[in-house]
Image: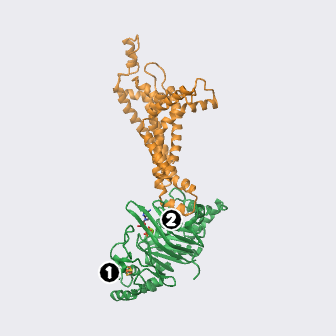
Amino acid sequence: MLTYALRRTLISIPIIILATFLTFGIISISGDPLQEIRQLPNITQEQIDNVRESRGLDDPVTVQYLRWVENIAQGSFGEYMISPRAIWPDIQRVLGNTMQLVIAAEIIAFVLAVFLGVMSAKRQYSLFDYTTTTISFIGYSFPSFLFALFLQVAVVQIFVRTGVRIFPIGNLSSANPGTGLSFLIDRIWHLILPMASLAIFSVASYSRYMRASMLEVINSDYVRTARAKGLPERTITTRHAMRNALIPTLTVAALSFGTLLGGTIIIETVFGLDGMGRYFFQQLGRRDPYPLMAWLTIVAIVIVIFNLIADLLYGYLDPRIRYD
Amino acid sequence: MTEPLLSIRDLVTEFSTPDGVVHAVDGVSYDVFPGETVGVVGESGSGKSVTVMSILRLIPEPPGRIARGEIMLEGRNLLELDDDELRAVRGKDIAMVFQDPMTSLNPVLTVGSQIAEAITTHDSKVNDAEARRRTVELLELVGVPNAAARFGQYPHEYSGGMRQRAMIAMAIANQPKILIADEPTTALDVTIQAQVLNVLAKAQKETNAGTILITHDLGVIAEMADRVVVMYGGRVVETGTVDDIFHNPTHPYTLGLLSSLPRSDRQLERLEPIPGQPPSLINLPKGCAFHPRCRMSAGRDVCRTEVPELVQLGEGRASACHFHEELPEEIARIEAAMGLEFGADEQEGE
Ligand SMILES: Nc1ncnc2c1ncn2[C@@H]1O[C@H](COP(=O)(O)OP(=O)(O)O)[C@@H](O)[C@H]1O
Ligand code: SF4
Ligand SMILES: [Mg+2]
């Protein structure tokens, strides 16, 4: 298993290199990296030429790319074009914030989806089943930013009418969040609305998977065997049915992690959260290739890691799969 | 005879399907006495499995529904038990071996743990170590080599024959009073069918359980069963001892089954196969369900209009044919035509 994980990691290195090279090329030809600098007041042509030369912007793309790789090899994502400030500390900060949001959303979405899927399957064609099915389809097709806006409007309306501020509609923390437990509670309080907006799509999609695989398992021969043995219904559901039905659902969930990260671009912007998504959105307008490259590389690595986790989980849950 | 251990009385089980109501089991009655093996035969789709699934209420509901009848086990009607009482019967008083060992075991749990849980769920005093010890004993009993090591293996690490042995071990784990085996060897390779049947016979001896053995193989019936129940179109058409059924069948359908049996004295030909197809259980033929395929009916009206009752002809002997007393002539006719004697083959084998 360890050698398998190692091999899989090694295989993903060339994939990441190829992906970064392609995006580097695309970003290079898609705009003027000096656009922001040109717009500065009182900037002289000489200063612009200086930057162009010191950054090697006239070199061929491959040379520029290799220079970028060299930076990474030294543990840095380079500096912003406009000011000699390191990119990595910013990435570190927003990555940490986004991971809190996304992992919490993923866990909550998964637990809720499993519960809904199991209950729907066990009561197929009941009112509960039809209701969750309908809500799922709405959640599935409804744009998450609209959902986020509705939540914000609702919270503001409640505040205006009652003076009670149920949830904040922006930021990661209050002005004085305190430390330790009070900081944690303050953080969770701030993350609830963004989390809900982000999770609704995942709940909808994972619960459909869970329902479908649960239905298949409930009607399987081995569940009939379990029942014929005289096991209590709860044991049949959890030990015999759910364990099997979870396998495809967990895989889908782990593989969908990238989609969730993509969702943060909108949600973090709507809620003004200092995370990866909003960072990407901000940098996109500035034509500076280096922060964008840093962002894409990190996202690619995170997705690769979650694909690997999906694979290993699959092998752990299904004894028929063996890695060697 | 003594009292029956299990009595199925007038059982009716139906399925609602988009095409109509499937009358899978239509008034079936038969008994199982202590220690005996009842063989149930009939073409595929005749309601053999649905009958035994109904005993433990393992029919998927919906679309299935047990509409009528009684399943009496030692004076209790199993169809009236509440969930907890039913659970106490399942796998304890009555245990089952299913047809397909490839799909009947849970792929993500070890074989050993699946047998062990059959023990612990009915006896909370048994701890894990004890359940494990007993499971290993059971696996040894059914001839799984290296049982202690194979306890922790998963179903995919077992061959088909070994899985069916494990299923048998699971079924006898609680010394059931009734053991039901639904075509236990049909899904297996021909070369290991005999071994698994031997294991089943041994398991039955060990527990002295009254056994229901479903098969479409009359050879298996001849070897394993004491009494035979013949089913057709969701109904019982004949019952009798193995001797009765093989030598003096009292229903044309049974006779048809016997005639289509390949025999060692006329090896290559499958003589006189039953013409036509098994009936549709949605629109069962009026009158005797067998009449469209019956040679003996000879177009007589009563066969097409009146459902023949299952009439008692003697101790444990019954037939559902309006003209059962004509059977000896029919047998003589076929024997003459084929130059053989019914039952002779099986006698040699014994
Ligand atoms: N779950 C089900 N839904 C609909 N019809 C069923 C179901 N299970 C069994 N049947 C029908 O019941 C009839 C009897 O089936 P069965 O008892 O399995 O026959 P067999 O004698 O081969 O064991 C068949 O026609 C089958 O189509
Ligand atoms: S009742 Fe008539 S049709 Fe049915 S088996 Fe007897 S002879 Fe044949
Ligand atoms: Mg069957």
Q: Disc 2 designates what residue?
A: B163
| Co-location on one chain, circles 1 and 2 | yes
Residue for point 43% across, 25% down: A283
Q: Chain B is drawn in which colour?
A: green
Query: What number of labels is visible?
Result: 2
Q: Which of B107 and A309 is in front in this view?
A: B107
Secondary structure of the residue carrying numbered label 1: loop
Circle 1 sits on which residue?
B299
Chain letter for the orange colouring in the rendering: A
Going by the numbered disc 2, the residue's amino acid type is Arg
Residue B235: x percent and y percent?
44, 74
Residue B67 vertical position relative to residue A103 in the rendered view, above or below? below
Under circle 2, the secondary element is helix
Please tell me which of labels 1 and 2 falls first in the chain: 2
Query: Nearest the camera: B72 or B90?
Result: B72
Quadrant for ligand 3 reads bottom left
Mark on residue A69?
Answer: none
